[in-house]
Amino acid sequence: MKNVKFANYDAKVGNNVAAAISSCSHCFHDAATDSGARTITFSGLTFGAKVTFKARYTTPFRAIYYDLDGTLTGKGAKSWMTPYYLHNVWADACTVETN
């Protein structure tokens, strides 16, 4: 995804708040046969003031977001965003952010 501007992603339905970016396979069924784990590349993203969450994960919670320029993660060029799994947390290399 390149040079995309997001605005007005602040809707809330129940406990779910809209996110500008989301990746899923059979999002509404935890027994999906697709294991996910796709890597999606991002650059040149702009998020408006009404974007509550930039990204979220749904079933099967395995997408990998590669940020070429830091506009998705805010962590600088060539940074990564993945769902939380303890084995992916490396001291001094990762930050854990929760919604």
Image: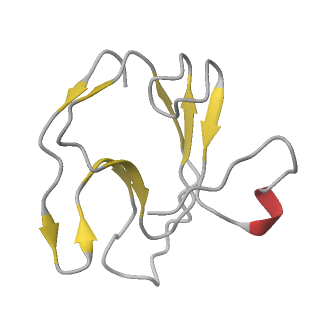
Left/right of residue 14 with respect to residue 80 in the rendered view: left
* Closest to the observer, 33 or 56: 56
Residue in front for this viewpoint, 98 or 43: 98
The number of discs equals: 0
84 relative to 67, above or below: below
**Position of residue 41 measured from the top left corner of the image (x, y, whole percent):** 50, 28
Residue 1 image position (x, y, % from top left): 37, 25
Name which quarter of the figure residue 85 lies in.
bottom right
Instruction: Work out which residue is located at the far right of the displayed protein and give it.
Output: 91
Task: In the rendered view, tell whether residue 42 sits above or below residue 51.
Answer: above
Q: Check the image and name the residue furthest to the front.
A: 49
Q: Residue at x 35, y 70 (%)?
A: 26
Q: Is residue 87 above or below residue 70?
A: below
Q: Quadrant of residue 30?
A: bottom left
Closer to the camera in the image, 3 or 17: 17
Residue 68 image point, x, y percent: 56, 19
**Left or right: 72 as drawn, with respect to 16:** right
Residue at 35%, 52% (x, y): give it: 22
Q: How is the image coloured?
A: secondary structure
Q: Quadrant of the C terminus?
A: bottom left
- Where is residue 2? Give x, y as percent: 36, 18
Residue shown at the point (12%, 42%) measured from the top left:
8
